[in-house]
Image: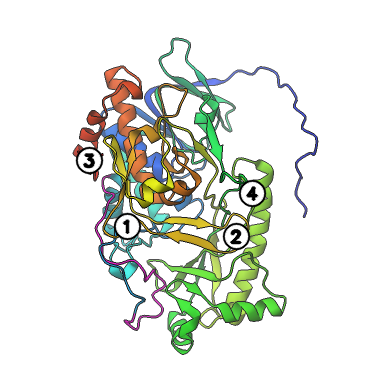
Amino acid sequence: MPILEEPREPRTVTLPPRPARHGGRCDVLVVGGGPSGFAAAVGAADAGADVVLAERYGFLGGNATVALVMPLMSFHNEHKQAAFTESGDTSRLLPTDHGEGEPVVAGVLWQLLDRLMGRGGCLPPSPKTGYTVPFDPELFKLALLEMMDESGVRMLFHAFASGALPLDDGSGWRVVFETKSGPVVIDAGVVVDGTGDGDVATSCGAPYEIGRPEDGLVQPMTLMFRVADFARPDFADYVRAHPDQWRGVHGLWDLIEEARAAGELRLPREDVLLFATPHPREVAVNSTRVNRVLGTSVWDLTRAEYTARRQLAQIDRFLRTRVPGFEESYVVQSGTHIGVRESRRVLGDYQLTGHDILAARTFPDVVAHGAYPVDIHNPRGSGTVLKRVPRGSFYDIPLRCLVPRDTERLLVAGRCISGTHVAHSSYRVMPIAMATGQAAGVCAALTVRHGRGPRGLPYRLVQRELLRQGARLRMGDG
């Protein structure tokens, strides 16, 4: 494999001190413009804070746009279990196993969806979509830019956070960014870490965990890609003729075995996973898988990107040569960055558990909800574990999961909030990340306004502001 391997013997060198340009000060600095980060920025600005959002790429959206993680998964509870579709629409390429329910996430998420639907940039969640939201990633980028403009959030692109230092007077943090202009620092009263990997939180001294308890392994990475010129009617004809070979969004087991026997396909997963997009002649392919790699290691990321792109080429050839409907198809776009499901989980004042999720537990300091199943892609190889939240129920995420231990004036949002490996497999999905992001942004803004750290802020104030912003909250339980 022609990649630079990590040296066997660790060795460090000391770099000389260097000056950095001061980029200014703000009330709330949000690091990362993905689902959690942009929601945090909107929430903080709506609560009256002066907000800066710094993003490592030249556009917003994180996993939704950088990694093409499509569609948005269901953010609805399930009052009634769905049966496998018998409608005859065998080519809809959307989940068929999620029954009727109601949304448990609102606020910034619905502001975004309303904007996307107005542009034809997404399909609304409904029984027909399995309550997922297929979206167009380019319109997603544009919608987020518009929301930032309207919120008054100042943005800095192409800025990779590399460290953080406490301000001398204890009034907040100075975050260091690597840029084409050299190092730039921004001072903030409160920082929200929306990096997904907890990069800033760990620089601030927050403790964290990685992987499952028994061996430290994390869920695999996946490089998503979009395929155009897909002939849906021809694919539907194949599925009707081979009903045992397709289940809503995944299958093709016999064709995969034929390709493996011919030496054409070598993948560490057992099926092909396809999702519809808002465009009828396009599908999103979620079928690459790279195990035993960590999103906080440059060596692992390099190996993962290399391996996944080799897998992409195999899958593309397999689809075009063996799967009806794909004969004239082509890969129109692949992720700029491989999709990382799991890396650091920052330890907060409370750690959400798998039991909390599967018991639909309530908390008095609830700031977000989730109803997505426990969904663990095998860290060692093929297979996926899926365990549902009790029918008609949803679980709470308490504010304490967003407050890292051993730190002040710092909050985390998205997939790096405080939870176990099992719990993380549910709350990691993008709609829930938006909910925790909005909550973190609101808490950050109120922290600055009231002049006390997040721990000293009454959680009822955060809940009240979230409700004013249209968030969904079940209160008074726990």
208 shown above or below 406: below
Closest to the observer: 312 or 269?
269
325 sits left or right of 456 in the view: right
* Dot in front, 2 or 1: 1
Please report the bounds of the magenta region as a residue range. 86-107
Q: Is disc 3 placed on a helix, strand or loop?
A: loop
* Dot in front, 4 or 3: 3
Three-letter code, disc 3 = Asp
Of the 4 image quadrants, the one containing the N terminus is bottom right
* Labelled disc at residue 142: none
Residue 252 seen from this side: yes
442 sits left or right of 187 in the view: left
Q: Residue at 63% across / 55% down in the picture?
A: 291
How many numbered tags mark residues here?
4
Three-letter code, disc 1 = Pro
Which one is earlier in the sequence, the residue at label 3 or at label 2?
2
Q: Is disc 4 placed on a helix, strand or loop?
A: loop
Task: Work out how far the residue at label 4 is from the one at label 1, CA to CA, in angstroms.
Answer: 32 Å
Residue 36 image offset from top left, x and y in percent:
40, 42
* Labelled disc at residue 477: 3
Residue annotated with mark 2: 289
For label 4, the crowd category at 10 Å Cα-Cα, with few meaning under 14, some 14 to 19 and many 20 or more, is: many
Residue annotated with mark 1: 390
